[in-house]
Amino acid sequence: MPNVLITGANRGLGLEFVRSFAADGWRVHACARNIEKAKKVKALSGDVICHKLDVTNGLKVASLARELADEPLDLLINNAGVYGPRTGFGETDYEEWASVLQVNTMAPLRVVERFVGVLEKSAGKTIVNISSRMGSIASNSSGSSYIYRSSKAALNMVTRGLSVDLGPKGFTVISFHPGWVQTDMGGESADIPAEDSIAGMRKVIAGLTPEDNGKFFNYDGSEIDW
């Protein structure tokens, strides 16, 4: 039975990831800061194990990694993320910027550093960071959203760094743009439902090869310029 750990698993993309993997017979470690309130996660059928986890708390992340040390982890999905203030030039809240960076950029690296030993015991050795096309420097033609954009651009650099450091050990590390998805963050007017986004990303994940290590993918499998 393959194992996956998903952060930010209580709603939106994370919840759909949990549902989809569990339905296909995976053991799913579903992590969220307020997991005790995650009724939808707890109601899912399948082998779903819920963990209370604040990804910005290094001690809590390390504790969970020790708890799962004897269970090989095939796939880690760093999904937890926040948008932060939707402000433009001249309106930047620098304290909020630091908070967003803690969740979107620093936490994924922290989780990988603590769980790398658990992942190394598996055959999968796959790390997926949920980024955004808004983190692509090449694709930025509209400006604004400095806080969110910069946090995801920095996450993409984390992905590239991890791909270089862990690739020789047999790991595959990628970033994903999940699309503009109908979630709390994306809003009801977004392009696609969460089910379509997750189905697309799972198809890409299933087909990953060592040559894909360090790439930035759209949910449909097309590559995105950094």
Image (spheres, rainbow, N blue to C red):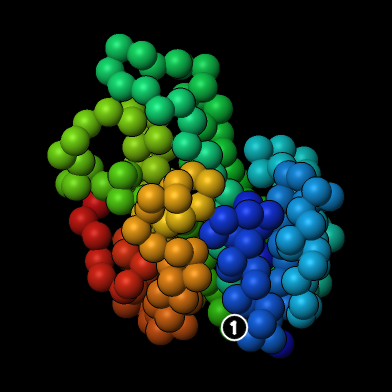
* Residue plotted at (46% across, 16% down): 94
Q: Look at the numbered disc 1 and give the secondary structure of its residue.
A: loop
Q: Position of residue 35 (x, y in %)?
A: 78, 51
Q: Position of residue 153 (x, y in %)?
A: 34, 42
- Left or right of 184? Residue 8 is right
- In the picture, which quadrant includes the N terminus? bottom right
The answer to whether residue 21 of the structure is visible from this angle is yes
* Residue plotted at (46% across, 83% down): 206
* Residue plotted at (36% across, 67% down): 219
Q: Position of residue 193 (x, y in %)?
A: 45, 64
Residue labelled with disc 1: 123
**How many numbered marks have been drawn onto this rendered protein structure?**
1
The amino acid type, in three-letter code, at marker 1 is: Ala
Query: Quick check: 113 above or below 141?
Result: below
Quadrant in the rendering for residue 160? bottom left
* Residue plotted at (62% across, 77% down): 21
- Left or right of 131? Residue 9 is right
- In the picture as drawn, the residue positioned furthest to the top comes out as 90
The answer to whether residue 116 of the structure is visible from this angle is no
